[in-house]
């Protein structure tokens, strides 16, 4: 129990040294990682169900409407693939926006920390190094936190985009296979 107390005390101390901007950066990174986990959850669990339902719908079209022209099938194929791509890319743009926002918030922390340093210098002069150091840490800690959040997000965005591309190609091939299989049976 003592370990948790020290852990949370050190986190609270770190957040206090970074100023109010660090809380904003923490909240942004929390939302960022919530959306990232949601995307991986979707890829692992929900996408399988969505792709199965689209494939089943695609198979049912061949049996229920055998006389539809190939042009209509091609348009329906594009529509179904587009729906799945839309589901795959659902929060990717939000994740990219939050990644781009992290360093900007870090820069905001730098500016607010330097303003605090200049206020201290105006009040007490340059003689009190301890007060100036607290303002400088208030400037550097949010910058570091924003950069760490952005770097972790950039890496994961690449993984998500590659996964999205691979899954969309895979489902496209399955639908094309079903269409060719239907054409060969006729």
Image: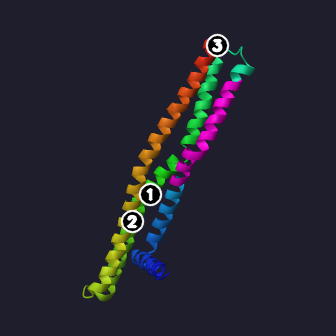
Callout 1: SS: helix
Residue 101: image tag: 1
- Asked if the stretch drawn in magenta spans residue 45, the answer is yes
Instruction: Where is residue 41? Give x, y as percent.
Output: 56, 50
Q: Is tag 2's residue or tag 1's residue first in the polypeptide sequence? A: 1
Q: Nearer the viewer, residue 87 or 45?
A: 45
Spatial CA distance of label 2 from label 1 is 12 Å
Helix, strand or loop: magenta stretch: helix
Q: In the image shown, does 133 or 155 lie closer to the viewer?
A: 155
Colour mapping: rainbow
| Residue that mark 2 sits on | 145
Give how far apart the Cα atoms at labels 3 and 1 are. 54 Å
Q: Earlier in the sequence, mark 3 or mark 1?
A: 1
- Please identify the quarter of the rendering in which residue 112 is found: bottom left
Outermost residue on the right side: it is 64
Separation of residues labelled 2 and 3 (CA atoms): 60 Å
Q: Mark 3, mark 1: which one is toward the viewer?
A: 3
Q: Which residues are magenta?
A: 36-60
Residue position marked by numbered label 3 in the rendering: 185
- Based on the picture, tell me whether residue 98 belongs to the magenta stretch: no
Name the one closer to the observer, 150 or 43: 43
> In which quadrant of the rendered view does residue 150 lie?
bottom left
Residue at the image position 67 percent from the left and 30 percent from the top: 56
Image spot of residue 157 (x, y percent): 44, 48
Question: Label 3 crowding class (10 Å Cα cut-off): few <14, some 14-19, many 20+?
Answer: few
x 31%, y 88%: residue: 124
Farthest-out residue, front: 1
């Amino acid at each position: 129990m003592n370990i948790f107390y020290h852990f949370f005390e050190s986190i609270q101390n770190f957040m206090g040294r970074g100023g109010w901007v660090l809380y904003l950066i923490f909240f942004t990174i929390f939302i960022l990682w919530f959306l990232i986990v949601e995307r991986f959850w979707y890829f692992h669990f929900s996408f399988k169900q969505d792709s199965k339902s689209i494939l089943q719908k695609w198979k049912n079209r061949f049996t229920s409407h055998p006389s539809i022209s190939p042009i209509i099938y091609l348009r329906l194929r594009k529509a179904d693939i587009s729906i799945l791509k839309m589901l795959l890319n659902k929060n990717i743009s939000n994740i990219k926006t939050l990644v781009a926002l992290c360093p900007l918030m870090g820069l905001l922390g730098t500016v607010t920390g330097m303003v605090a340093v200049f206020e201290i210098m105006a009040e007490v002069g340059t003689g009190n190094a301890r007060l100036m150091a607290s303002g400088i840490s208030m400037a550097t800690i949010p910058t570091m936190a924003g950069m760490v959040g952005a770097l972790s997000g950039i890496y994961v965005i690449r993984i998500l985009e590659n996964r999205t591309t691979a899954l969309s190609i895979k489902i496209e091939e399955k639908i094309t296979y079903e269409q060719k299989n239907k054409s060969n049976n006729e």
